[in-house]
Image (cartoon, rainbow, N blue to C red):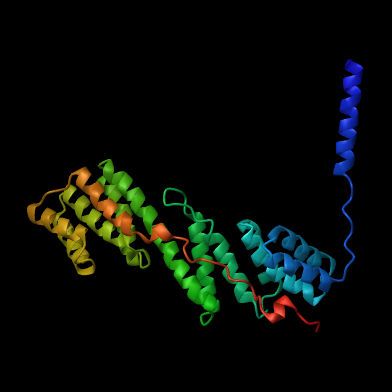
Amino acid sequence: MIKYLSSVVFVALFLLTGCGTTPEKERTEPPEVLYREAIADLQSGRYTAATKLFQEIDQKHPFSPWALRSQLVVIYTQFKKEEYDEAAAAAERFIRLHPRHASVAYAYYMRGLADFMRISDPLRDQNRTRQAAVALREVIARFPDSDYAQEAQRMLKLCNDRMAAQEVVIGRFYLDRDEFIAAANRFRRVVEHPDFSRTPYAEEALFSLVLTSLHLGMSEDARHYAAVLGHNFPQSMFYRQTRLMVDNQGTLSKDDLLALRSSLDEKSILKGFFEGIGPGVPGLTDQVMSPQRK
């Protein structure tokens, strides 16, 4: 019985090994045929198959005009597969190989967008957000008149919102534990940063600086931050509460503070953080879809 089982296992392993080592059939079609097949896969949403074909064209026909176009479009197919590391690497490669190409703006944009799509929530490290901000600023600086620059400006604003949000989240953590100096340092970063001060989180940061200043006995600082809050957000619930606190030299209960925070969260643009963000298609124009030989 044991010998019989051993024989069965051996045969099964042999079959599995044989299936796993069967070489894939070599594609011998010319690059233009492979390219049109890849485009058909792309248009049908078969992004894995399209990626494979575009990469095959690039590897087997590196000096053909189809290779360059494949390098460009594969950035898009990797992005659509949500393989953002690979999309960023493909974009970086295109930038390195073709720094003066007419479509290099797209590669810069997609590199920034790939970083943008990997941004985490404010409770996590924001290194990806900082990377995305750097890449997006480069798009704006290099291609200021392009549509990509306009989209990069919008995404950069969202990056700043996310980084400001993290400062507020950490500031809240310290404030809720009565660590007023540490909390004030975080809120001050939002108020004093030229980009963060334009985000919705500046409102809560100013209010929290009033609160921490009162707790620390710094009434003049509290009045200063209250005045700035009133100038920039005169109709806000935060400002109405601030006036009562400063006039009466009082503070705020934690329940009331949580209620104020929730009022900001409901308005937060982070609720729709990724809405409307998309890669566009890299020149799904006649030139890229059916390029002519040069």
Pick out the residue farthest to the left.
248
Quarter-of-image position of residue 20: top right
237 sits left or right of 285 in the view: left
Residue occupying image coordinates x 20% and y 55%? 210
- Residue 288: percent from left, percent from top: 71, 77
- Residue 222: percent from left, percent from top: 17, 57
Pick out the residue farthest to the top.
1
Residue occupying image coordinates x 21% and y 58%? 238
| Image label count | 0
48 sits left or right of 113 in the view: right
271 sits left or right of 226 in the view: right
- Residue 88: percent from left, percent from top: 62, 62
Residue occupying image coordinates x 57% and y 68%? 279
Question: In which quadrant of the rendered image does the N terminus lie?
Answer: top right
Is 196 drawn above or below residue 4 in the view shown?
below
Q: Nearer the viewer, residue 205 or 152?
A: 152
Quarter-of-image position of residue 179: top left
Residue occupying image coordinates x 70% and y 75%? 98
Question: In which quadrant of the rendered image does the C terminus lie?
Answer: bottom right
Pick out the residue farthest to the front.
44
- Residue 58: percent from left, percent from top: 79, 67
Q: Nearer the viewer, residue 34 or 257?
A: 34
